[in-house]
Amino acid sequence: MNREEARLELDATTLRPQDASPEARAMAQSDPELGAWLKKRTEFDEQVAGAFAATIPAGLRASILQNSRRPAKRSIRWVLPTLAAAAAAVVLGWTMLWPVNSGMPDWQADSLAAVMKVEYGMSKVDHMSRDFEAIKKMLVADRSPTPARLPGTVGTMPVLACKRIQVAGRVASIICFEIEPGKEAHLVVMGNTGLSELPPQLQPEFKTSKNWNMASWSDGSQTFLLATTADEAVLKKMFGLV
């Protein structure tokens, strides 16, 4: 079993680690990078599972139990596969949406995971405002980094909210913008001292993962990641490249 085969197996069994082969589990323990990826992936899946459970209507369990005591109009063998299929669809859906992969540097993986949680409502923002200067003051008050400057028209997008997060063991910020009607773009700002595999200075580096388009760049002692599910052309337009 090679590293990628182990990652695929572990990815499919994050909520059922006992189902992973001993070889895959051993590789995660001996490979620090794979182990770190598995930890983040498992944390995300557990949050998704919790969020899914929280959406089950109150009283549904009692209703199911009550109905189970009544004469069944159709065999339980038809009900159980339906429930299993629904659960599998949820897991498969999130697996297909999950954009973080083991090839990303830690700062980028942490940033994108935090952005995805905000995008899908799994993590609440700290402050909401349509005033960018007000957003920056809120971040300063929270002792979170604010952008010293932004390229192109990134800073002119309508601002929505902000949040203090942790990225690669340091405090970082997410600033949420509306990049186009109905689509958000999330800017992660962090200090880059001690970070590895940094993007180039003042030159956006574009990357696509699943349905996410990203631009990463550094500016002096700060590093940025701008991520959105809007089209890549819309993202590049922010930097005057379209």
Image: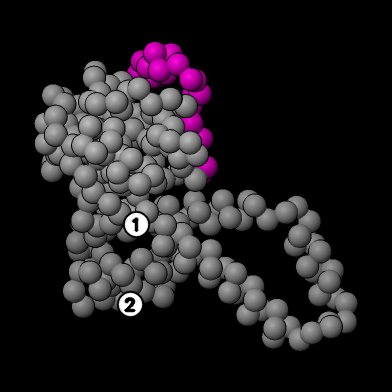
Taking the spot 70% from the left edge, 79% from the top edge, the residue there is: 79
Depth check: give the residue in front, 137 or 213.
213
Image: magenta residue range: 121-144
Under mark 1, the amino acid is: Lys
Q: Which residue is mark 2?
A: 21
What secondary structure is found at the residue carrying circle 2? Answer: loop
- Residue 195 visible: no
Q: Is residue 153 above or below residue 233?
A: above
Q: Is residue 123 magenta?
A: yes
Color style of the picture:
one colour
Under mark 2, the amino acid is: Ser
Image position of 205 (left or right of 88): left
- Judge the density around disc 2: few (<14), some (14-19), many (≥20) Cα neighbours within 10 Å: some
Q: Residue furthest front?
A: 242
Rendered location of residue 159, percent (x, y): 43, 25
Q: Is residue 176 magenta?
A: no
Q: Which residue is mark 1?
A: 210
What secondary structure is found at the residue carrying circle 1? Answer: loop
In what quadrant of the picture does the N terminus appear?
bottom left
Rendered location of residue 90, percent (x, y): 53, 63
In what quadrant of the picture does the C terminus appear?
top left
- Residue 117 visible: yes
- Point out the tag, 1 or 2, that comes first from the N-terminus: 2
Image position of 96 (left or right of 22): right
Q: Residue furthest right?
A: 70
Taking the spot 39% from the left edge, 69% from the top edge, the residue there is: 12
